[in-house]
Image (tube, grey):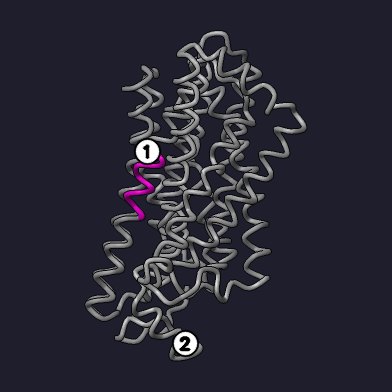
Amino acid sequence: MESSPPPPATGVSPNPKNKEDSSSYQNSTFSISLPISDSQTKTSPKSSKNYNLLLAINYALLFVGSISSTLVSKYYFIHKGSSKWVSTLVQSAGFPLLVMPVYLPFILGYTKRRPFSRFTRQLLALSTGVGVLLGINNLLFSWGNAYLPVSTSSLLISSQLAFNLILSVLIVKQKVNFLNLNCVMLLTLSSVLLGLGSSHSKPMGLTQAKYWVGFFSTLGAGLLFAVYLPVMEMIYRKVYCYAMVVEMQLVMEMAATAFAAAGMAVDHGFSDLRVESRAFDKGPVAYWLTIAGNLILWQFCFLGTAGMVFLTTSLTSGICMTALMVVNVAGGVVVYGDEFGGVKAVAAALCIWGFCSYLYGMYVKKKKENRN
């Protein structure tokens, strides 16, 4: 990605339209001037501190949301939840939770910037389109999560990094080096090994056909999410503050929810909710708590992802998510007793090796930049 001049030392977002915009950005916790690429990190101490704090918050949201949402989603299917559309819906239907960070700073007087100001029709259309894409991704993930162990699906999702690198090169002109390619090759090999060697460990009662449906659905989810990341990086170039990221996320989640709700309506899923809650082997209360948990935790995951793309790059965000896959694998083994034989051990080791390779590449690059 090409480097551009750093933002002004005042912490104001680049090129504000007028003085009112400038003062409102300075007074807004959610409208801090933030670099959109790794090359734009030379900011004032105050801006740098806010940037690092916001980056830490978003990675914490991604960490908690990614691990917890995967485990809670699997809990739904393990205890006789069966609707793929319900699992898809809950991944986005928690969007009302985003209303608070969108409107609360303005209501409390922390910022003069009105929510959705300068939110153009183009941004609205892009957010809606990406939201539908996200809804399809959620459906594919639900199919995979229904049929595969948590550890298997988590390792398969790590394959999104290979797609992510390729699409980042094509869409946002990401530079490729040996360590990038090494990371991608190791993670891809990890997924291939897993697919070839772990189909025999499928859950009891699951047919071979359903196993492969889950396998390829998860790979499809990884591919679509790999498309989502660089596309969002490109769109975020039109965004000048973090508040707009949250606003776009709200619109995207609404579009994804509309897609899932339409699917449920066609499949008569809404009428089956009450029946399914009674069939849930932990009881109706546990069923609705599981649904509520999914609503909250998936919003953590997606908001953290969006923030990471905005604050860094799509590839860095993909790398961070891949690193969490190993923790997800461990979570599946610890919480649900997933098998962790030789194939998964090798696949996890390759995943860690690939991530460490990327981190080393970032370290070498940073060291070289400091010398210059």
The magenta-colored residue range is: 58-66
Local SS, label 1: helix
Local SS, label 2: loop
Residue placed at 64% from the left, 65% from the top? 124
Residue 147 visible? The answer is: yes
Q: Residues within 10 Å of mark 2 (few under 14, many from 20)?
A: few
Residue 274 place in picture, x, y as percent: 61, 20
Residue placed at 74% from the left, 33% from the top? 265
Which residue is farthest top? 205
Name the residue tied to disc 1. 350
Q: Quadrant of the C terminus?
A: bottom left
Q: In the visual, does 223 lie left or right of 184?
A: right
Q: Which label belongs to residue 150? A: none
User: Foreground: 335 or 123?
Assistant: 123
Main SS of the magenta segment? helix
Residue placed at 42% from the left, 66% from the top? 107
Kindly report the distance in space between the C-alpha atoms of the residues bearing marks 1 and 2.
45 Å
Of callouts 1 and 2, which one flags the residue occurring earlier in the amino acid sequence?
A: 2
**Looking at numbered disc 2 in the image, what kind of residue is underneath it?**
Asn
In the rendered view, tell whether residue 22 sits above or below residue 38. below
Residue 303 place in picture, x, y as percent: 45, 53
In the rendered view, tell whether residue 330 sits above or below residue 27. above
User: Foreground: 115 or 124?
Assistant: 115
In the rendered view, tell whether residue 227 sits above or below residue 234. above
Q: Which label belongs to residue 15? A: 2
Which residue is farthest bottom? 19
**Looking at numbered disc 1 in the image, what kind of residue is underneath it?**
Leu
Residue placed at 32% from the left, 62% from the top? 54
Residue 202 place in picture, x, y as percent: 51, 16
Question: Which quadrant of the structure image shows residue 353?
Answer: top left
Q: Residues within 10 Å of mark 1 (few under 14, many from 20)?
A: many
